Amino acid sequence: MLESDISYLLKRGVAEIIVEDEMAQLLRAGKKLRLKEGFDPSFPDIHLGHMVALRKLHQFQERGHQIVLIVADWTAQIGDPSGMSATRPMLTLEQVKANALTYMQQFFKIVDKQKTEIRWQSEWFDKFTLSDIIQLTSKFTVAQFLARDDFSARYKAEKPIALTELLYPLLQAYDSVAIEADVEFGGTDQKFNFLVGRELQSMMGQRPQQCFMVPLLVGTDGSQKMSKSLGNCIGVTEPPEQMYGKVMSIPDSLVLTYFELLTDVPDQELGEFREGLEKEKLNPMMLKKRLAREIIAQLYDQKAAAEAEGHFERTVQRKEKPEEIALGTKSGKSLQDYLVENRLAKSKSEARRLIDQGAVYINDERVKDANYTVQKDDIIRVGKRRYIKST
RNA sequence: GGAGGGGUGCCGGAGUGGUUAAUCGGAGCAGACUGUAAAUCUGCCGCCCUAAGGGCUACGCAGGUUCGAAUCCUGCCCCCUCCA
């Protein structure tokens, strides 16, 4: 394996590797590595934040390494009730299976299914007895676990920590033993769990796994990590036009990071982008358009990317009407009622507000009269991009 | 077992008898601006009727006190922390 290739694998879009030198050695030795990736079936949807690690996995896979995907059907029941959120409901076996299926459909948009081994935690944990659990727990101390950022912060803040939560890292660690992982992949927030795995493996006579951590992707809001519960994410199954729009809506300051983490655009070109932005020779909008195309091309294809761009240019940049306008209900009602009926407003009050604010247009003319009677074939627009045609 | 803290709108979080539909922040929506659905600025942001204005429903649940309660009292449910 070429040194430049190794360097690319270990540097591009990587936050931290424990231990980086060992990792490089393993690659130079040309050994086929077992790459562990776990997923919690309580959240089956993959977004661009997850894609960062998955892209890395794919890069390794292309170089002959073996991905082992672990369906964490046991740890899913423990959950991570961050802060105030309600205790996660226990999933039934059927739900877990359904979620796993959904997840894998998305997972295999990014990695190669043929070169992936799928394992379920229940393969080993179903056989666990109380004595196994006691043995496992006896290997670590409370102090060790309280050292974890999240736990110590909560402990200091007098916030609850469920006992089962302490079990979470342990179970995850045991997975590494069960599948004899060489490397575990994930975001930097997984560091503690990865390290427990590393330690447990070595206690149990295995070679400790390498911990490969990618940065957490910042979401479309530009400040917090991308996550479904924060509503700032772009899902990998979203339709291309929607994905395109969401990429365009990320803050300009995020564009280079996104390129680095989510595309194969070479580092050298990224340098040019950076310089262009600093000297204001490049318009961030143009870069974001390129970014959106790159991402969509990976998840769909070039054609979809081009179409999504066309759609964006027409509807957003040139403010043209979409090719197809959804048909609404029968005309003859007041505008206010019509908006509610067609779900362009949640309530009559909201409809009235929209009208008062000048957000409602009929056939390209702003209408301020809530009592306007909707005529047949009126093209009603609310805000910048919601259209409906009356019937 | 004992002591204490708390349950407020989509979320976080103020408010401890009346100008409180409820400060503020975030999210969301809209308008302006813009080479971007970036940034920035402005407005809106429970429901219903409206020209102004008005009505109704809301602060864990159920009662009560009061001219008037998110705010006081009683009971109940739930959550958390500490000590043992």
Image (spheres, coloured by chain):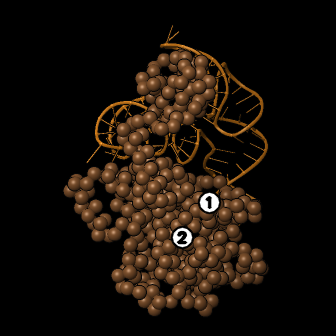
Chain colours: A brown, B orange
Q: Left or right of A148: which side holds B59?
A: right
Res. A389 mark: none
The N terminus of chain A is located in which quarter? bottom left
* Residue at (59, 18) in percent of width and height: A332
Q: Quadrant of residue A169?
A: bottom right
Task: Name the secondary structure under disc 1.
Answer: loop
Q: Is residue B59 above or below residue A42?
A: above
Badge 1 amino acid: Phe
Residue B43 rendering spot, x and y as whole percentages: 42, 29
Q: Left or right of A382: which side holds A105?
A: right
Q: Left or right of A301: which side holds B54?
A: right
Badge 2 amino acid: Val
Q: Can residue A391 be seen in the rendering of this structure?
A: yes
* Residue at (51, 82) in percent of width and height: A64
Res. A111 mark: 2
Residue A84 rendering spot, x and y as whole percentages: 60, 54
Label located before the other in sequence (1 or 2): 1
Q: Marks 1/2: CA distance?
A: 19 Å
Front-lying residue, A323 or A260: A323
The C terminus of chain A is located in which quarter? top right
Task: Name the secondary structure under disc 2.
Answer: loop
* Tag 1 and tag 2, C-beta contact below 8 Å: no
Q: Residues within 10 Å of mark 2 (few under 14, many from 20)?
A: many
Residue A209 rendering spot, x and y as whole percentages: 53, 83
Q: Residue under mark 2: which chain is it in? A: A
Residue A12 rendering spot, x and y as whole percentages: 38, 72
Q: Residues within 10 Å of mark 1 (few under 14, many from 20)?
A: some
* Residue at (53, 56) in percent of width and height: A235
Q: Can residue A153 be seen in the rendering of this structure?
A: no
- Which residue in the structure is indicated by mark 1? A43
